Amino acid sequence: MKKLFDIDDSVENLIIGFLNGKLSAEETDKLNNWIEEAPDNRDLFGIYQEVWLASSTFSPNDQFNSSEAWKKINHRMKKPLSYRQAYEVRLKSRRKFIRFARIAAIFVAVITISALASFLIFSSKFDIYNDTLSEISVPQGSRSKVLLPDNSTVWLNAGSKISYHNNFNRKERIVMLEGEGYFDVVSNPQKPFIVRTSHLNVRAPGTIFNVKAYPEEDAVSTTLIEGVVTIEIPGINDKPLLYNLEPKQNITYNISDKSVSNEQIAETIEDDYEYDEKIITIEKPAKPIPNLLVRNNIRPEIYTSWKDEEWIIEGETLSDFAIMLERRFNTRININTDELKRYRFTGIIMNETLEQVLDILGLTTPLKFTVGKGVVDWEIDHERKEEFDQLLY
Protein backbone atom coordinates (compact mmCIF):
# COMPACT_ATOMS: atom_id res chain seq x y z
CA MET A 1 0.00 0.00 0.00
CA LYS A 2 1.29 3.35 -0.97
CA LYS A 3 1.35 5.75 1.91
CA LEU A 4 -0.07 9.20 1.91
CA PHE A 5 3.04 10.55 3.66
CA ASP A 6 6.45 9.33 4.56
CA ILE A 7 5.62 8.05 8.02
CA ASP A 8 6.92 5.12 10.07
CA ASP A 9 4.78 2.02 10.14
CA SER A 10 4.87 2.00 13.94
CA VAL A 11 3.45 5.54 14.09
CA GLU A 12 0.80 4.76 11.50
CA ASN A 13 -0.21 1.69 13.46
CA LEU A 14 -0.50 3.83 16.57
CA ILE A 15 -2.76 6.29 14.71
CA ILE A 16 -4.88 3.44 13.33
CA GLY A 17 -5.14 1.90 16.77
CA PHE A 18 -6.12 5.26 18.28
CA LEU A 19 -8.81 5.87 15.65
CA ASN A 20 -10.16 2.37 16.29
CA GLY A 21 -10.08 2.93 20.04
CA LYS A 22 -7.74 0.02 20.66
CA LEU A 23 -4.64 1.68 22.08
CA SER A 24 -3.37 0.83 25.51
CA ALA A 25 -2.38 3.57 27.94
CA GLU A 26 1.30 3.05 27.11
CA GLU A 27 0.66 3.20 23.33
CA THR A 28 -1.44 6.32 23.79
CA ASP A 29 1.48 7.98 25.58
CA LYS A 30 3.80 7.07 22.67
CA LEU A 31 1.38 8.59 20.16
CA ASN A 32 1.05 11.77 22.24
CA ASN A 33 4.84 12.09 22.45
CA TRP A 34 5.13 11.76 18.64
CA ILE A 35 2.41 14.38 18.08
CA GLU A 36 4.16 16.82 20.41
CA GLU A 37 7.58 16.36 18.74
CA ALA A 38 6.86 18.69 15.81
CA PRO A 39 4.03 20.85 14.41
CA ASP A 40 4.09 18.79 11.22
CA ASN A 41 3.31 15.65 13.20
CA ARG A 42 0.29 17.35 14.73
CA ASP A 43 -0.90 18.39 11.26
CA LEU A 44 -0.39 14.88 9.90
CA PHE A 45 -2.35 13.38 12.74
CA GLY A 46 -5.11 15.90 12.06
CA ILE A 47 -5.28 14.89 8.39
CA TYR A 48 -5.53 11.19 9.28
CA GLN A 49 -8.24 12.00 11.78
CA GLU A 50 -10.28 14.10 9.30
CA VAL A 51 -10.04 11.47 6.56
CA TRP A 52 -11.07 8.82 9.07
CA LEU A 53 -14.13 10.76 10.17
CA ALA A 54 -15.07 11.69 6.59
CA SER A 55 -14.87 8.01 5.56
CA SER A 56 -17.01 6.75 8.42
CA THR A 57 -19.79 4.29 7.63
CA PHE A 58 -22.77 3.78 9.94
CA SER A 59 -24.78 0.60 10.23
CA PRO A 60 -28.59 0.54 10.63
CA ASN A 61 -28.01 0.52 14.37
CA ASP A 62 -25.97 3.74 14.11
CA GLN A 63 -22.80 1.92 15.15
CA PHE A 64 -19.51 3.09 13.64
CA ASN A 65 -18.06 0.51 11.18
CA SER A 66 -14.31 0.95 11.58
CA SER A 67 -13.39 -1.76 9.03
CA GLU A 68 -15.32 -0.09 6.25
CA ALA A 69 -13.92 3.28 7.21
CA TRP A 70 -10.34 2.01 7.08
CA LYS A 71 -10.93 0.44 3.67
CA LYS A 72 -11.97 3.84 2.38
CA ILE A 73 -8.85 5.37 3.90
CA ASN A 74 -6.67 2.74 2.20
CA HIS A 75 -8.41 3.45 -1.07
CA ARG A 76 -7.75 7.16 -0.72
CA MET A 77 -4.17 6.54 0.32
CA LYS A 78 -3.48 4.76 -2.99
CA LYS A 79 -3.83 8.14 -4.65
CA PRO A 80 -0.60 10.02 -4.01
CA LEU A 81 -0.93 13.56 -2.73
CA SER A 82 1.69 16.09 -1.99
CA TYR A 83 1.90 17.49 1.48
CA ARG A 84 0.66 20.82 0.13
CA GLN A 85 -2.35 19.19 -1.51
CA ALA A 86 -3.15 17.33 1.67
CA TYR A 87 -2.90 20.56 3.62
CA GLU A 88 -5.25 22.27 1.17
CA VAL A 89 -7.72 19.39 1.54
CA ARG A 90 -7.58 19.86 5.23
CA LEU A 91 -7.94 23.65 4.98
CA LYS A 92 -10.93 23.26 2.64
CA SER A 93 -12.49 20.86 5.05
CA ARG A 94 -11.98 23.33 7.89
CA ARG A 95 -13.58 26.14 5.88
CA LYS A 96 -16.60 23.98 5.18
CA PHE A 97 -16.81 23.15 8.85
CA ILE A 98 -16.57 26.82 9.83
CA ARG A 99 -19.36 27.74 7.40
CA PHE A 100 -21.46 24.89 8.71
CA ALA A 101 -20.75 25.93 12.30
CA ARG A 102 -21.84 29.50 11.58
CA ILE A 103 -25.09 28.30 10.01
CA ALA A 104 -25.62 25.91 12.90
CA ALA A 105 -24.94 28.70 15.39
CA ILE A 106 -27.54 30.93 13.74
CA PHE A 107 -30.00 28.05 13.68
CA VAL A 108 -29.35 27.28 17.34
CA ALA A 109 -29.73 30.97 18.24
CA VAL A 110 -33.09 31.15 16.43
CA ILE A 111 -34.26 27.98 18.13
CA THR A 112 -33.04 29.26 21.51
CA ILE A 113 -34.78 32.63 21.13
CA SER A 114 -37.96 30.93 19.97
CA ALA A 115 -37.78 28.50 22.86
CA LEU A 116 -37.18 31.32 25.32
CA ALA A 117 -40.09 33.33 23.95
CA SER A 118 -42.32 30.26 24.09
CA PHE A 119 -41.20 29.63 27.66
CA LEU A 120 -42.01 33.17 28.72
CA ILE A 121 -45.39 33.12 26.98
CA PHE A 122 -46.42 29.72 28.18
CA SER A 123 -44.99 30.20 31.67
CA SER A 124 -47.05 33.37 32.04
CA LYS A 125 -50.10 31.51 30.81
CA PHE A 126 -49.23 28.71 33.17
CA ASP A 127 -49.16 31.16 36.07
CA ILE A 128 -52.51 32.57 35.00
CA TYR A 129 -54.20 29.23 34.75
CA ASN A 130 -52.47 27.84 37.81
CA ASP A 131 -52.78 30.88 40.05
CA THR A 132 -52.84 29.06 43.33
CA LEU A 133 -52.84 30.42 46.84
CA SER A 134 -50.59 29.42 49.68
CA GLU A 135 -52.54 29.63 52.91
CA ILE A 136 -51.41 29.38 56.52
CA SER A 137 -54.07 29.11 59.21
CA VAL A 138 -53.54 29.16 62.96
CA PRO A 139 -56.28 27.55 65.04
CA GLN A 140 -57.70 28.92 68.26
CA GLY A 141 -55.40 28.32 71.20
CA SER A 142 -52.22 28.54 69.11
CA ARG A 143 -49.73 31.03 67.71
CA SER A 144 -47.34 30.51 64.84
CA LYS A 145 -44.26 32.00 63.21
CA VAL A 146 -44.16 31.94 59.40
CA LEU A 147 -41.26 32.64 57.01
CA LEU A 148 -42.42 34.09 53.69
CA PRO A 149 -40.66 33.49 50.32
CA ASP A 150 -38.92 36.89 50.53
CA ASN A 151 -37.55 36.00 54.01
CA SER A 152 -39.98 38.34 55.74
CA THR A 153 -41.32 36.96 59.02
CA VAL A 154 -44.90 36.89 60.24
CA TRP A 155 -46.16 35.93 63.68
CA LEU A 156 -49.82 34.91 63.55
CA ASN A 157 -52.11 35.15 66.54
CA ALA A 158 -54.74 32.55 67.38
CA GLY A 159 -57.61 32.27 64.91
CA SER A 160 -55.64 34.04 62.16
CA LYS A 161 -54.93 33.27 58.53
CA ILE A 162 -52.66 34.66 55.81
CA SER A 163 -52.57 33.75 52.14
CA TYR A 164 -50.51 34.81 49.14
CA HIS A 165 -50.36 33.95 45.43
CA ASN A 166 -47.75 31.65 43.92
CA ASN A 167 -46.12 34.62 42.14
CA PHE A 168 -45.32 36.31 45.47
CA ASN A 169 -42.06 38.31 45.33
CA ARG A 170 -41.80 38.21 41.52
CA LYS A 171 -43.34 41.60 40.80
CA GLU A 172 -44.99 42.44 44.11
CA ARG A 173 -45.38 41.21 47.65
CA ILE A 174 -49.02 40.94 48.70
CA VAL A 175 -50.47 38.92 51.55
CA MET A 176 -54.10 38.68 52.62
CA LEU A 177 -54.74 38.72 56.36
CA GLU A 178 -57.66 37.63 58.47
CA GLY A 179 -56.96 37.99 62.15
CA GLU A 180 -53.82 39.42 63.71
CA GLY A 181 -50.27 39.39 62.44
CA TYR A 182 -46.94 40.89 63.49
CA PHE A 183 -44.85 41.58 60.37
CA ASP A 184 -41.07 41.93 60.21
CA VAL A 185 -40.64 42.86 56.54
CA VAL A 186 -37.41 42.62 54.55
CA SER A 187 -36.70 45.96 52.88
CA ASN A 188 -37.25 46.16 49.12
CA PRO A 189 -38.41 49.61 47.88
CA GLN A 190 -38.91 48.22 44.37
CA LYS A 191 -41.42 45.67 45.69
CA PRO A 192 -43.53 47.21 48.46
CA PHE A 193 -44.97 44.77 50.96
CA ILE A 194 -48.77 45.03 51.10
CA VAL A 195 -51.06 43.54 53.73
CA ARG A 196 -54.64 43.40 52.53
CA THR A 197 -57.54 43.12 54.93
CA SER A 198 -61.25 43.20 54.22
CA HIS A 199 -61.41 46.95 54.97
CA LEU A 200 -57.97 48.50 54.48
CA ASN A 201 -54.49 47.87 53.12
CA VAL A 202 -51.13 48.45 54.79
CA ARG A 203 -48.24 49.27 52.44
CA ALA A 204 -44.65 49.05 53.67
CA PRO A 205 -41.30 49.05 51.81
CA GLY A 206 -39.69 47.22 54.71
CA THR A 207 -40.48 47.71 58.38
CA ILE A 208 -42.01 46.19 61.54
CA PHE A 209 -45.69 46.58 62.29
CA ASN A 210 -48.74 44.84 63.72
CA VAL A 211 -52.14 44.52 62.05
CA LYS A 212 -55.28 43.38 63.84
CA ALA A 213 -58.18 42.65 61.50
CA TYR A 214 -60.44 39.92 62.82
CA PRO A 215 -63.50 39.72 60.54
CA GLU A 216 -65.88 39.39 63.51
CA GLU A 217 -64.68 42.65 65.09
CA ASP A 218 -65.88 46.17 64.30
CA ALA A 219 -62.44 47.77 64.11
CA VAL A 220 -59.15 47.29 62.26
CA SER A 221 -55.97 48.62 63.84
CA THR A 222 -52.35 48.97 62.79
CA THR A 223 -49.42 49.64 65.10
CA LEU A 224 -46.05 50.75 63.74
CA ILE A 225 -42.89 49.76 65.57
CA GLU A 226 -40.17 50.75 63.10
CA GLY A 227 -39.98 52.49 59.72
CA VAL A 228 -43.01 53.87 57.93
CA VAL A 229 -46.24 52.43 56.56
CA THR A 230 -49.09 53.87 54.53
CA ILE A 231 -52.65 53.02 55.42
CA GLU A 232 -54.92 52.78 52.37
CA ILE A 233 -58.68 52.74 52.81
CA PRO A 234 -60.27 52.07 49.42
CA GLY A 235 -63.72 52.89 48.14
CA ILE A 236 -64.35 56.29 49.72
CA ASN A 237 -65.73 58.57 47.00
CA ASP A 238 -63.88 56.32 44.54
CA LYS A 239 -60.59 57.61 45.94
CA PRO A 240 -58.50 55.83 48.55
CA LEU A 241 -57.91 57.58 51.82
CA LEU A 242 -54.17 57.54 52.62
CA TYR A 243 -52.49 58.03 55.97
CA ASN A 244 -48.76 57.72 56.68
CA LEU A 245 -48.11 56.14 60.05
CA GLU A 246 -45.00 56.91 62.10
CA PRO A 247 -43.22 54.79 64.72
CA LYS A 248 -45.04 54.46 68.05
CA GLN A 249 -48.34 55.31 66.42
CA ASN A 250 -51.50 53.24 66.30
CA ILE A 251 -54.36 53.85 63.92
CA THR A 252 -57.81 52.38 64.52
CA TYR A 253 -60.40 52.27 61.76
CA ASN A 254 -63.91 51.87 63.13
CA ILE A 255 -65.97 49.98 60.57
CA SER A 256 -69.19 49.69 62.56
CA ASP A 257 -72.28 51.67 61.70
CA LYS A 258 -72.11 53.53 64.99
CA SER A 259 -69.90 56.58 64.96
CA VAL A 260 -67.41 56.73 67.81
CA SER A 261 -66.24 60.14 68.95
CA ASN A 262 -62.74 61.00 70.07
CA GLU A 263 -64.11 61.73 73.53
CA GLN A 264 -65.51 58.22 73.83
CA ILE A 265 -62.28 56.61 72.65
CA ALA A 266 -60.17 58.90 74.82
CA GLU A 267 -61.88 57.45 77.90
CA THR A 268 -60.30 54.09 77.13
CA ILE A 269 -56.69 55.29 77.03
CA GLU A 270 -54.31 56.48 79.68
CA ASP A 271 -53.58 60.14 80.36
CA ASP A 272 -49.97 59.89 79.19
CA TYR A 273 -51.13 58.99 75.67
CA GLU A 274 -51.46 61.65 73.04
CA TYR A 275 -54.07 61.35 70.34
CA ASP A 276 -55.12 63.37 67.32
CA GLU A 277 -58.19 65.51 67.89
CA LYS A 278 -58.86 65.48 64.15
CA ILE A 279 -61.11 62.73 62.89
CA ILE A 280 -60.30 62.15 59.24
CA THR A 281 -63.34 62.59 56.98
CA ILE A 282 -64.13 63.54 53.41
CA GLU A 283 -66.77 66.10 52.47
CA LYS A 284 -70.06 64.76 51.07
CA PRO A 285 -69.08 61.10 51.22
CA ALA A 286 -70.78 58.59 48.97
CA LYS A 287 -71.42 56.48 52.07
CA PRO A 288 -71.06 57.04 55.83
CA ILE A 289 -67.42 57.16 56.88
CA PRO A 290 -66.50 55.62 60.21
CA ASN A 291 -63.98 57.32 62.41
CA LEU A 292 -60.23 57.00 62.20
CA LEU A 293 -58.38 57.46 65.46
CA VAL A 294 -54.61 57.94 65.54
CA ARG A 295 -52.88 57.41 68.87
CA ASN A 296 -49.40 58.89 69.31
CA ASN A 297 -46.63 58.13 71.78
CA ILE A 298 -47.94 54.64 72.51
CA ARG A 299 -46.20 51.69 74.10
CA PRO A 300 -46.00 49.28 71.14
CA GLU A 301 -45.62 46.21 73.37
CA ILE A 302 -49.20 46.64 74.56
CA TYR A 303 -50.31 45.91 71.01
CA THR A 304 -47.69 43.31 70.10
CA SER A 305 -46.85 41.34 73.27
CA TRP A 306 -49.43 38.66 72.43
CA LYS A 307 -46.58 36.89 70.60
CA ASP A 308 -44.11 37.12 73.51
CA GLU A 309 -43.68 35.26 76.79
CA GLU A 310 -44.92 38.31 78.68
CA TRP A 311 -48.39 39.20 77.49
CA ILE A 312 -49.05 42.78 78.58
CA ILE A 313 -52.66 43.79 79.15
CA GLU A 314 -53.46 47.42 79.88
CA GLY A 315 -56.89 48.88 80.50
CA GLU A 316 -58.85 46.23 78.57
CA THR A 317 -62.54 45.98 79.30
CA LEU A 318 -63.60 42.51 80.42
CA SER A 319 -65.79 42.38 77.33
CA ASP A 320 -62.76 42.73 75.01
CA PHE A 321 -60.48 40.72 77.25
CA ALA A 322 -62.92 37.80 77.16
CA ILE A 323 -62.57 37.66 73.37
CA MET A 324 -58.78 37.68 73.68
CA LEU A 325 -58.91 34.83 76.20
CA GLU A 326 -61.24 32.82 73.98
CA ARG A 327 -58.69 32.90 71.17
CA ARG A 328 -55.67 32.27 73.36
CA PHE A 329 -57.13 29.31 75.27
CA ASN A 330 -59.56 27.98 72.65
CA THR A 331 -62.61 28.21 74.86
CA ARG A 332 -65.95 30.01 74.87
CA ILE A 333 -66.68 32.63 77.48
CA ASN A 334 -70.25 33.63 78.26
CA ILE A 335 -70.66 36.94 80.10
CA ASN A 336 -74.03 36.51 81.78
CA THR A 337 -74.03 39.94 83.48
CA ASP A 338 -73.73 42.92 81.16
CA GLU A 339 -72.64 45.15 84.00
CA LEU A 340 -69.47 43.08 84.29
CA LYS A 341 -68.32 44.12 80.80
CA ARG A 342 -67.41 47.66 81.86
CA TYR A 343 -64.73 46.58 84.36
CA ARG A 344 -61.14 46.76 83.18
CA PHE A 345 -58.06 44.64 83.67
CA THR A 346 -54.37 45.57 83.67
CA GLY A 347 -51.61 43.05 84.24
CA ILE A 348 -48.91 40.79 82.78
CA ILE A 349 -49.70 37.19 81.87
CA MET A 350 -46.85 34.78 81.31
CA ASN A 351 -47.38 31.01 81.31
CA GLU A 352 -50.53 30.96 83.39
CA THR A 353 -53.32 28.56 82.57
CA LEU A 354 -56.85 29.82 81.91
CA GLU A 355 -57.88 28.94 85.45
CA GLN A 356 -54.95 30.90 86.85
CA VAL A 357 -55.85 33.91 84.72
CA LEU A 358 -59.44 33.70 85.94
CA ASP A 359 -58.23 33.59 89.53
CA ILE A 360 -56.23 36.77 88.92
CA LEU A 361 -59.29 38.43 87.38
CA GLY A 362 -61.30 37.43 90.43
CA LEU A 363 -58.84 39.34 92.63
CA THR A 364 -59.01 42.55 90.62
CA THR A 365 -62.69 42.61 89.55
CA PRO A 366 -66.00 41.38 91.07
CA LEU A 367 -65.90 38.35 88.77
CA LYS A 368 -67.41 34.99 89.63
CA PHE A 369 -66.80 32.23 87.12
CA THR A 370 -67.74 28.62 86.44
CA VAL A 371 -65.53 26.43 84.26
CA GLY A 372 -67.14 23.74 82.12
CA LYS A 373 -66.01 21.62 79.21
CA GLY A 374 -64.82 24.09 76.59
CA VAL A 375 -66.87 26.90 78.08
CA VAL A 376 -66.58 29.39 80.94
CA ASP A 377 -69.48 31.34 82.41
CA TRP A 378 -68.88 34.78 83.90
CA GLU A 379 -71.22 36.65 86.18
CA ILE A 380 -70.89 39.44 88.66
CA ASP A 381 -70.37 38.80 92.36
CA HIS A 382 -72.79 41.31 93.82
CA GLU A 383 -71.34 41.14 97.36
CA ARG A 384 -67.84 41.91 96.16
CA LYS A 385 -69.18 44.45 93.67
CA GLU A 386 -70.02 46.81 96.54
CA GLU A 387 -66.45 46.59 97.79
CA PHE A 388 -65.05 47.42 94.34
CA ASP A 389 -67.54 50.24 93.85
CA GLN A 390 -66.41 51.78 97.12
CA LEU A 391 -62.83 51.67 95.91
CA LEU A 392 -63.76 53.16 92.55
CA TYR A 393 -65.79 56.09 93.82
Image (spheres, rainbow, N blue to C red):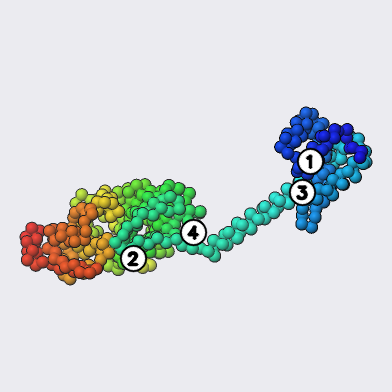
Q: Position of residue 112 (x, y in %)?
A: 67, 52
Q: Which mark is residue 166?
A: 4
Q: Nearer the viewer, residue 179 or 196?
A: 179
Q: Residue at x 75, y 31 (%)?
A: 33
User: Which of these two is toward me, 91 or 297?
Assistant: 91
Name the quadrant of the N terminus: top right
Which of label 2 and label 1 is nearer to you?
1
Query: How many other residues sit within 10 Å of disc 4, few (<14), some (14-19) or many (≥20)?
Result: some
Q: Residue 174: x, y in percent?
A: 44, 57
Query: In the figure, 1 relative to 37: above or below?
Result: below
Residue 218, picture quadrant: bottom left
Q: Nearer the viewer, mark 2 or mark 3?
A: 3
Q: Are marks 2 and 1 in contact (CB under 8 Å)?
A: no
Q: Locate residue 296 relative to residue 196 in the image: left or right.
A: left
Helix, strand or loop status at disc 4: loop
Residue at image location 90% in from the left, 41% down from the top: 77
Camera-nearest residue between 138 and 393: 138
Residue 316: image quadrant is bottom left
Look at label 1 and name its amino acid: Gly
Mark carried by residue 215: 2
Residue 166 visible (yes or no): yes
Q: Mark 3 — residue?
A: 103
Check disc 1 and report the residue beneath it. 17
Q: Mark 2: which amino acid?
A: Pro
Tell me which numbered mark, 2 or 3, is placed earlier along the sequence. Answer: 3
Gap in angstroms between the C-alphas marked 2 and 3: 64 Å
